[in-house]
Amino acid sequence: MAQKVRDIMSGPPVTVSPDTDLATAAKKMRDKNVGAVLVTEGDDLTGVVTDRDLVVRGLADEADPKSKLGGIVSRATATVGPDDDLDKAVSLMRERAVRRLPVVENGRPVGIVSMGDLALEKDEKSALADVSAAKPNR
């Protein structure tokens, strides 16, 4: 059983700049089959945008799909390192009520760990693990 974040994280992360528009970010998520992108300026992590952010804070608020992500980016309130224990990731997700954590090493984003990743590792028979392991609907 994996004990470190590096053993289960997805990486390298899909990144975009704050100047990326909503439609481009959505297409990138679709093409890479991910539910979140990390927003970076150079090598610095500045935030996270999820598929839910695009819908709830973007399209539902009638944002133009060509508008920049800046208005809907969630600040990365917590990160983990690749050598952190899985229990730390679980604890941070609970504390911060987030479903994904950026994985940062030497100040640079190197991956993402999600609730689904943790479910697959900790309880492979759970409903969340089943959904997380399923092929995408396309």
Image (spheres, rainbow, N blue to C red):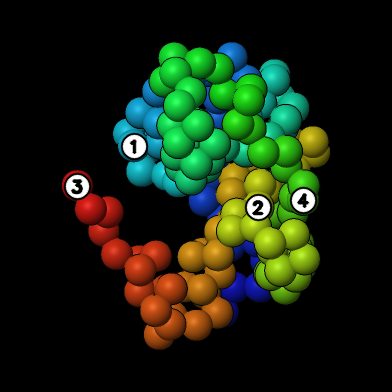
Residue 53 showing in the rendered view: yes
Residue type pointed to by label 4: Ala
Q: Earlier in the sequence, mark 3 or mark 4?
A: 4
**Residue under circle 1?**
30
Q: Which disc is residue 138 wearing?
A: 3
Going by the image, does 54 lie left or right of 83?
A: left
Q: Earlier in the sequence, mark 1 or mark 4?
A: 1
Going by the image, does 92 lie left or right of 71?
A: right
Identify the element where label 1 is drawn.
helix
How far apart are the two marked residues, 3 and 4, measured between alpha carbons?
Answer: 32 Å
Identify the element where label 4 is drawn.
loop
Q: Nearer the viewer, residue 87 or 24?
A: 24
Look at 23% across and 53% down and name the residue there: 137
Look at 65% across and 52% down and name the residue there: 101
* Mark 3 residue crowding within 10 angstroms, few (<14) / some (14–19) / many (20+): few
Q: Position of residue 132 (x, y in %)?
A: 39, 65
Q: Position of residue 122 (x, y in %)?
A: 55, 79
Vertical position of residue 90 compared to residue 76: above or below? below
Q: Nearer the viewer, residue 80 or 1?
A: 80
How far apart are the two marked residues, 4 and 2, measured between alpha carbons?
Answer: 7 Å
Q: Position of residue 47 (x, y in %)?
A: 68, 35
**Residue under circle 2?**
101
Q: Earlier in the sequence, mark 3 or mark 2?
A: 2
How far apart are the two marked residues, 1 and 4, measured between alpha carbons?
Answer: 25 Å
Q: Which disc is residue 78 wearing?
A: 4
Q: Earlier in the sequence, mark 4 or mark 2?
A: 4
Q: Position of residue 48 (x, y in %)?
A: 62, 38
